[in-house]
Image (cartoon, rainbow, N blue to C red):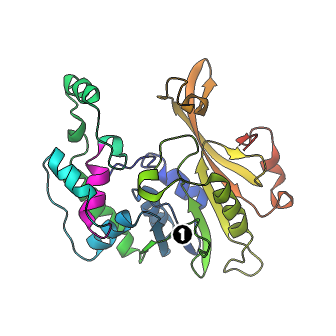
Amino acid sequence: MRYLGGKSRTAKQIAAIVSPTGLWWEPFCGGLSVSVALAAISRQAGVVSDANLAVISLYRSVQAGWVPPEGGTVTVEDWHAAKLLPDTDPRKALIGIGGSYGAIWFRWPTVEKRVEWHKKQRYWNSIDPIGAAGRSVVAKVADLTAARCAFEHIDFLAPDTAPPAGTEVIYCDPPYEGTTGYEDATGPFDHVAFWRRCIAFSALQGPAPGATIRVYVSEYACPQWVPHEQVWSRSSGCMITGTGSGLDKRCDSLEGKKVRTERLFRVYPSFADVPVSGKGPDNGTVSGR
């Protein structure tokens, strides 16, 4: 299932770096691409969670044997009816993501956008029809079930949230700062609180004697005040345009072209814990955040 900010193209690379040796936790599981890659490379059980109850309900329902409907586009009536479904109904997330424009939570395209895509023979809902989205979810849930993974509804930023017992590594793919997120589903995202929580969790004792929990975060940039090391990056063509939205600041320049650079950071308890190799000038930091 296509998912806003999904990592289907980079999941295997990220998993190879995170490389769990024990229980892993992905608290922003989204479309499950990285979860499946982590399970495949580690052969260890994991906890797959998200703050969006509707998404977790979809995965749990499929795990329990619910079969998503096959094919067909989503009508306006279907789409509006799905918005009113309870978060425990698996159809809500299936339509709210798989049947929405750009895989954005219940985003219905404007008339102008529908006309534009239709002229290009790319009618918006035919790119990821409900049938394809459902089959993708079934396959990924099957892989994670075979790996003994659990699906949990957990809000990473809730005051009482703590890593599952025995966690060895945490991989976070949060809503990127300054980009479209899932505020309509889970409310505004506190980025400062998120980074503080990552620092706090990185200081907790892991299952191995003398080792703390390893915490990794995918983002475009990491605040200077966060102890971190950039461990991976990948640049691709930047589709973000315009200056009014502020999103253009997420594009970098590379050999005269605008690119968008995805980065993977490891977060540490303090700057004293950051390896010397991670303190160079190209560490993906951004000031004033």
The magenta stretch spans residue 93: yes
Q: Report the quarter where the C terminus lies.
A: top right
In the displayed image of the protein, which residue is found farthest to the top?
256
Q: Specify the segment rendered in magenta.
A: 87-100
- Hey, which quadrant is residue 81 in on the image? bottom left
Q: Position of residue 74 (x, y in %)?
A: 17, 47
Give the image location of residue 27, x and y in percent.
Answer: 52, 65
Q: In the rendered picture of this protein, how many numbered marks are placed on residues?
A: 1
Residue at far front of view: 84
Provide the secondary structure element on which disc 1 rests.
strand
| Residue 261 placement, left or right of 272 | left
At label 1, the amino acid type is Trp
Relative to 108, is 52 above or below?
A: below
Expressed as whole percent of the image width and height from the top left, the position of residue 118 reads: 20, 27
Relative to the observer, which residue lies in front, 104 or 131? Answer: 104
Is residue 65 found inside the magenta-colored segment of the image?
no
Residue 228 x, y percent position in the rendering: 74, 53
Residue 41 shows up from this direction: yes
Left or right: 185 with respect to 1?
Answer: right
The structure residue drawn at horizontal position 47% and vertical position 64%, both measured from the top left corner, is 51
Observer-nearest residue: 36 or 250? Answer: 250
Height in image: 165 above or below 234? below
Q: Which residue is mark 1?
A: 25
The residue positioned 73% from the left and 51% from the top of the image is: 229
Q: How many neighbours does mark 1 have within 10 angstroms: few (below 14), some (14-19), or many (20 or more)? A: many
Q: Is residue 182 visible?
A: no
